[in-house]
Image (spheres, rainbow, N blue to C red):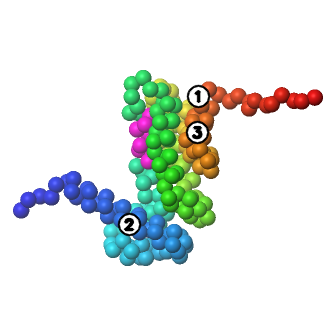
Amino acid sequence: MTEVPVGRRERKKAATRQAIADAALRLFLERGYDQVGIRDIADEADVSTTTLFKHFTGKEALVFDQEGDREAELVAAVRDRPAGQDVLDALRQHVLDTWLPIAAHPQAAEFNDLVDSTPELRAYAERMWTRHAGSLAAAIADETGVDRDDLVCAALARFVLEIPSLARGRQDRRAAVETLFDLLAHGWKPPSQPPAHP
Protein backbone atom coordinates (compact mmCIF):
# COMPACT_ATOMS: atom_id res chain seq x y z
CA MET A 1 0.00 0.00 0.00
CA THR A 2 1.40 3.42 -0.94
CA GLU A 3 1.48 6.25 1.57
CA VAL A 4 -0.59 9.34 0.91
CA PRO A 5 1.84 12.22 0.36
CA VAL A 6 1.87 14.80 3.13
CA GLY A 7 1.03 17.46 0.56
CA ARG A 8 -2.26 15.79 -0.30
CA ARG A 9 -3.22 15.40 3.36
CA GLU A 10 -2.44 19.05 4.04
CA ARG A 11 -4.42 20.14 0.99
CA LYS A 12 -7.39 18.08 2.16
CA LYS A 13 -7.20 19.63 5.65
CA ALA A 14 -7.00 23.10 4.14
CA ALA A 15 -9.98 22.39 1.86
CA THR A 16 -12.05 21.12 4.81
CA ARG A 17 -11.12 24.18 6.86
CA GLN A 18 -12.09 26.49 4.00
CA ALA A 19 -15.39 24.67 3.43
CA ILE A 20 -16.28 25.08 7.11
CA ALA A 21 -15.36 28.78 7.10
CA ASP A 22 -17.32 29.39 3.88
CA ALA A 23 -20.38 27.60 5.28
CA ALA A 24 -20.18 29.61 8.49
CA LEU A 25 -19.93 32.95 6.73
CA ARG A 26 -22.76 32.06 4.35
CA LEU A 27 -25.05 31.17 7.28
CA PHE A 28 -24.01 34.19 9.35
CA LEU A 29 -24.77 36.55 6.45
CA GLU A 30 -28.10 34.85 5.69
CA ARG A 31 -29.44 34.42 9.23
CA GLY A 32 -27.35 36.63 11.49
CA TYR A 33 -24.55 35.57 13.80
CA ASP A 34 -26.68 34.89 16.88
CA GLN A 35 -29.17 32.75 14.96
CA VAL A 36 -26.55 30.22 13.80
CA GLY A 37 -25.17 27.46 16.00
CA ILE A 38 -22.09 25.29 15.68
CA ARG A 39 -24.25 22.30 14.72
CA ASP A 40 -25.84 24.36 11.89
CA ILE A 41 -22.40 25.17 10.52
CA ALA A 42 -21.16 21.58 10.77
CA ASP A 43 -24.27 20.33 8.98
CA GLU A 44 -23.93 22.95 6.26
CA ALA A 45 -20.26 22.00 5.72
CA ASP A 46 -21.11 18.28 5.95
CA VAL A 47 -18.65 17.62 8.80
CA SER A 48 -18.98 16.57 12.43
CA THR A 49 -18.75 19.15 15.21
CA THR A 50 -15.59 17.32 16.32
CA THR A 51 -14.03 18.01 12.91
CA LEU A 52 -15.14 21.63 13.10
CA PHE A 53 -13.41 22.07 16.47
CA LYS A 54 -10.23 20.47 15.12
CA HIS A 55 -10.01 23.44 12.76
CA PHE A 56 -11.50 26.30 14.79
CA THR A 57 -11.39 27.25 18.46
CA GLY A 58 -14.92 28.64 18.50
CA LYS A 59 -17.68 30.42 16.67
CA GLU A 60 -15.90 33.79 16.45
CA ALA A 61 -12.81 32.18 14.91
CA LEU A 62 -14.98 30.95 12.03
CA VAL A 63 -15.54 34.54 10.92
CA PHE A 64 -11.84 35.43 11.01
CA ASP A 65 -10.59 32.16 9.52
CA GLN A 66 -7.57 33.65 7.74
CA GLU A 67 -6.28 35.97 10.45
CA GLY A 68 -3.45 33.67 11.55
CA ASP A 69 -2.14 33.72 8.00
CA ARG A 70 -2.60 37.48 7.77
CA GLU A 71 -0.60 38.04 10.96
CA ALA A 72 2.23 35.82 9.66
CA GLU A 73 2.19 37.63 6.30
CA LEU A 74 2.36 41.02 8.03
CA VAL A 75 5.43 39.99 10.01
CA ALA A 76 6.98 38.41 6.89
CA ALA A 77 6.47 41.67 4.98
CA VAL A 78 8.87 43.29 7.44
CA ARG A 79 11.32 40.41 7.98
CA ASP A 80 11.49 39.13 4.39
CA ARG A 81 11.48 42.45 2.54
CA PRO A 82 13.93 42.86 -0.36
CA ALA A 83 17.41 44.15 0.42
CA GLY A 84 17.43 47.93 0.39
CA GLN A 85 13.68 48.33 0.98
CA ASP A 86 12.86 50.11 4.21
CA VAL A 87 10.27 48.82 6.67
CA LEU A 88 7.68 51.48 5.90
CA ASP A 89 7.85 50.89 2.13
CA ALA A 90 7.53 47.13 2.71
CA LEU A 91 4.42 47.68 4.85
CA ARG A 92 2.95 50.10 2.31
CA GLN A 93 3.35 47.52 -0.46
CA HIS A 94 1.94 44.77 1.75
CA VAL A 95 -1.21 46.78 2.58
CA LEU A 96 -1.71 47.72 -1.08
CA ASP A 97 -1.21 44.13 -2.25
CA THR A 98 -3.31 42.38 0.39
CA TRP A 99 -5.93 44.78 1.72
CA LEU A 100 -7.10 46.44 -1.52
CA PRO A 101 -8.32 43.12 -3.04
CA ILE A 102 -10.11 42.27 0.22
CA ALA A 103 -11.77 45.68 0.34
CA ALA A 104 -12.93 45.25 -3.27
CA HIS A 105 -14.50 41.84 -2.59
CA PRO A 106 -18.27 41.83 -3.33
CA GLN A 107 -19.04 40.63 0.23
CA ALA A 108 -16.74 43.11 2.00
CA ALA A 109 -19.53 45.49 3.04
CA GLU A 110 -21.72 42.63 4.30
CA PHE A 111 -18.80 41.17 6.23
CA ASN A 112 -17.96 44.53 7.83
CA ASP A 113 -21.62 45.07 8.76
CA LEU A 114 -21.73 41.60 10.35
CA VAL A 115 -18.67 42.33 12.49
CA ASP A 116 -19.71 45.89 13.36
CA SER A 117 -23.21 44.81 14.41
CA THR A 118 -22.16 41.84 16.56
CA PRO A 119 -20.60 42.66 19.97
CA GLU A 120 -18.85 39.26 20.24
CA LEU A 121 -17.24 39.69 16.83
CA ARG A 122 -16.20 43.28 17.55
CA ALA A 123 -14.55 42.14 20.80
CA TYR A 124 -12.82 39.22 19.05
CA ALA A 125 -11.59 41.55 16.29
CA GLU A 126 -10.19 43.95 18.90
CA ARG A 127 -8.25 41.16 20.66
CA MET A 128 -6.97 39.97 17.29
CA TRP A 129 -5.97 43.53 16.30
CA THR A 130 -4.05 43.95 19.57
CA ARG A 131 -2.20 40.66 18.99
CA HIS A 132 -1.32 41.68 15.43
CA ALA A 133 -0.06 45.06 16.68
CA GLY A 134 2.20 43.34 19.20
CA SER A 135 3.61 40.92 16.61
CA LEU A 136 4.18 43.68 14.06
CA ALA A 137 5.80 46.01 16.62
CA ALA A 138 8.16 43.20 17.68
CA ALA A 139 9.12 42.52 14.04
CA ILE A 140 9.77 46.23 13.40
CA ALA A 141 11.85 46.48 16.59
CA ASP A 142 13.88 43.40 15.64
CA GLU A 143 14.56 44.78 12.17
CA THR A 144 15.62 48.18 13.48
CA GLY A 145 17.72 46.84 16.34
CA VAL A 146 15.80 48.30 19.26
CA ASP A 147 14.08 46.75 22.28
CA ARG A 148 10.78 45.02 21.57
CA ASP A 149 8.93 47.40 23.91
CA ASP A 150 10.06 50.45 21.91
CA LEU A 151 7.26 53.04 21.94
CA VAL A 152 7.90 54.31 18.41
CA CYS A 153 7.73 50.77 16.95
CA ALA A 154 4.50 50.11 18.87
CA ALA A 155 2.98 53.37 17.60
CA LEU A 156 4.02 52.65 14.00
CA ALA A 157 2.54 49.14 14.15
CA ARG A 158 -0.77 50.42 15.52
CA PHE A 159 -1.03 53.17 12.93
CA VAL A 160 -0.21 50.81 10.04
CA LEU A 161 -2.90 48.39 11.25
CA GLU A 162 -5.39 51.27 11.44
CA ILE A 163 -4.81 52.32 7.82
CA PRO A 164 -7.33 49.86 6.28
CA SER A 165 -10.02 51.04 8.68
CA LEU A 166 -9.30 54.70 7.93
CA ALA A 167 -9.24 54.09 4.16
CA ARG A 168 -12.27 51.76 4.06
CA GLY A 169 -14.96 54.36 3.40
CA ARG A 170 -13.00 56.39 0.86
CA GLN A 171 -13.93 56.44 -2.80
CA ASP A 172 -10.30 55.95 -3.89
CA ARG A 173 -8.97 53.48 -1.34
CA ARG A 174 -5.56 53.20 -3.00
CA ALA A 175 -5.05 56.97 -2.83
CA ALA A 176 -6.17 56.96 0.80
CA VAL A 177 -3.65 54.23 1.69
CA GLU A 178 -0.89 56.14 -0.12
CA THR A 179 -1.81 59.38 1.67
CA LEU A 180 -1.68 57.72 5.07
CA PHE A 181 1.68 56.07 4.40
CA ASP A 182 2.98 59.42 3.10
CA LEU A 183 1.94 60.91 6.44
CA LEU A 184 4.02 58.27 8.23
CA ALA A 185 6.97 58.74 5.89
CA HIS A 186 7.07 62.53 5.83
CA GLY A 187 5.23 63.71 8.95
CA TRP A 188 2.13 65.82 9.30
CA LYS A 189 1.79 69.16 7.59
CA PRO A 190 -1.24 71.38 8.10
CA PRO A 191 -3.61 71.29 5.10
CA SER A 192 -3.10 74.35 2.96
CA GLN A 193 -5.80 76.94 3.40
CA PRO A 194 -7.02 79.12 0.54
CA PRO A 195 -5.98 82.75 1.05
CA ALA A 196 -8.52 84.83 2.96
CA HIS A 197 -10.33 87.42 0.87
CA PRO A 198 -10.70 90.92 2.33
**Rendered image quadrant of residue 176:** top right
Q: Which residue is drawn at 47% across and 72% down?
A: 27
Q: Can you name the residue that lies furthest to the right here?
A: 198
Kind of residue indicated by mark 3 = Ala
Instruction: Give whichever of discs 3 and 2 has the lower sequence position.
Output: 2
Kind of residue indicated by mark 1 = Ala
Instruction: Tell me if residue 50 can be seen.
Output: no
**Does the magenta segment cover residue 164?**
no
Q: How far separated are the C-alphas under marks 3 and 2?
A: 35 Å
Q: Give the range drawn in magenta.
A: 70-78
96 with respect to 8 (left or right): right
Q: Residue at x 55, y 41 (%)?
A: 174
Instruction: In this rendered view, identify the residue nearer to me: 85 or 71.
Output: 85
Which mark is on residue 175? 3
Q: Quick one: label 1, few (<14), some, or many (20+) residues within 10 Å?
A: few
Q: Which residue is drawn at 61% across and 47% down?
A: 171
Give the tally of numbered discs. 3
Secondary structure of the residue carrying tag 1 is: helix
**Does the magenta segment cover residue 76?**
yes
Q: Which one is closest to the eye, mark 1 or mark 3?
A: 3
Identify the residue under disc 2.
20
Q: Give the position of the C terminus as an image quadrant.
A: top right
Instruction: In this rendered view, identify the residue nearer to me: 186 or 159.
Output: 186
Instruction: In this rendered view, identify the residue nearer to me: 184 or 124.
Output: 184
Identify the residue under disc 1.
185
Secondary structure of the residue carrying tag 2 is: helix
